[in-house]
Amino acid sequence: MFQYLMPTKIHFGRGVIENNKNDMEKLGRKAYIITGKSSSKVNGSLAQITNALERLAIKYAIFDEVEENPSIETVEKAAAIGQKENVDFVIGIGGGSPLDVAKAVAVFIKNPQINKDNIIGSQQLSYLPVVAVPTTSGTGSEVTQHSVITFHREKTKKNLGQAIFPRVAYLDSSFTDHTPYDITVNTAIDAFTHLVESYLNTNATMMSDLYCEKGLELFKSCFEHLINRNLTEKFRDSMMLASMFGGIAIAQTGTSLPHGMGYPLTYYKGLPHGLANGVLTIEYLKIFKNKDKIKRMLKLLGMDKMEQLEKVFDTLIQVDIKLTSEEILEYSSGIASNKRKLKNHPEEVGEKDIEKVYRNSFK
Ligand code: NAP
Ligand code: ZN
């Protein structure tokens, strides 16, 4: 028995915005573009969207202040402007941060009674149509319902808990062609952890496994390209595809322990999202008791031993932060009380296991 839902219309390939711009015509007469501070102006994605809108005679306003790990205050600020501008739909352009803000803003504009104090725990709310243009590979946010936002008051990130699937996603990997090596690695590791955490998830189904297996297979060559710093167009296409598969998979299953455990590493230690999960992945895999699915996963990666994957991670991930014993205890008790994340991990796991993963990851 399974359920499957991923209602986003996907356009994948170089040049897809120009060739499929008419899909935006159906969404309204005024768009609200949500993006980061600079990258979308450099990689061509913003210009491609504004050109398409101008050709369709769709008016637009731009909010270009989204920071990494965006805060709920940024969502409120952008939504207030969007309400004044009377926009009909929202276009997120960038990495996961602008895409997640675009989704949240689509909810906030449609529901003026919603604010940072009452969004968490709200029942499902209506939202303006969202168009997503990812420029990292990545979070897969363009094909998930999740919007992950930082709440400084509680010193953590939270999934808003609303299902906000984009209506249309334009995936053009040429926007990633000149992404610096460190961002390429960090975001690739994020995509990889989505595939792993979905594959080894309590909620895994035949459908989510299909996407995970295809994505893991792509990583077989993507890891080689990353290690050799051979970042060809073919590699960029494969990475964006693998990221999309990871997104579709976590839209079905959610993520698991490393994502929950990574949040304090991002919040308190400033580790980029992908790196924060990646630094924990190997030790997380080691505490897994059921080795059958792990073996299948390694086989898809063209490996037969965990040590081979560990070597890849050692090469790609360099983190020079330290955790004190007090920090490990504090983070571990936080995640041990996060019932939602624990329930996605299919085996019994206690606070001591979580402490062990942190401790061994930062030896
Ligand atoms: P990001 O925070 O969106 O961006 C990181 C950096 O990369 C920024 O400096 C950004 O610059 C730059 N950048 C973006 N695209 C670029 C490009 N093509 N070339 C060069 N630089 C580029 O990073 P991300 O890893 O994609 O997203 C992480 C966020 O997504 C986290 O908040 C995480 O919690 C969330 N997430 C959401 C989901 C979901 O399903 N919704 C899943 C996983 C993660 P600018 O600021 O100038 O644009
Ligand atoms: Zn992630």
Image (tube, rainbow, N blue to C red):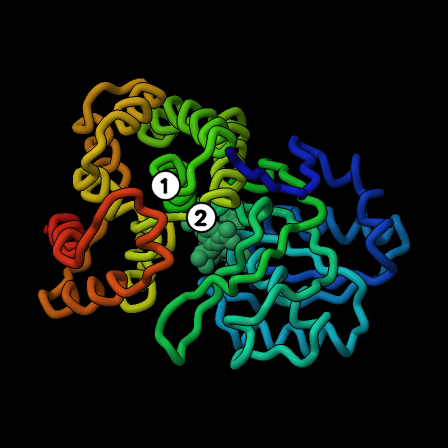
Asked if the residues shown at circle 1 and circle 2 are in contact, with their CB atoms under 8 angstroms apart, the answer is yes
Q: Viewed as shown, does residue 71 lie left or right of 198? A: right
Q: 191 and 57: which one is in front?
A: 191
Residue at (17% x, 58% y) in the render: 351
* Residue 139 x %, y %: 48, 47
- Disc 1 under 8 Å from ligand 2? The reply is no
* Residue 114 x %, y %: 62, 77
Residue 5 position (above or below residue 335): above
* Residue 239 x %, y %: 48, 33
Dividing the picture into quadrants, the one containing residue 41 is bottom right
Residue pointed to by mark 1:
201
Residue at (81% x, 72% y) in the render: 86
Q: 149 and 126: which one is in front?
A: 126
Please state which amino acid type lies under the numbered disc 2: Gly
Residue at (81% x, 49% y) in the render: 24
Please state which amino acid type lies under the numbered disc 1: Asn
Dividing the picture into quadrants, the one containing residue 248 is top right
Q: Residues within 10 Å of mark 1 (few under 14, many from 20)?
A: many
Residue 2 visible in the current orientation = yes
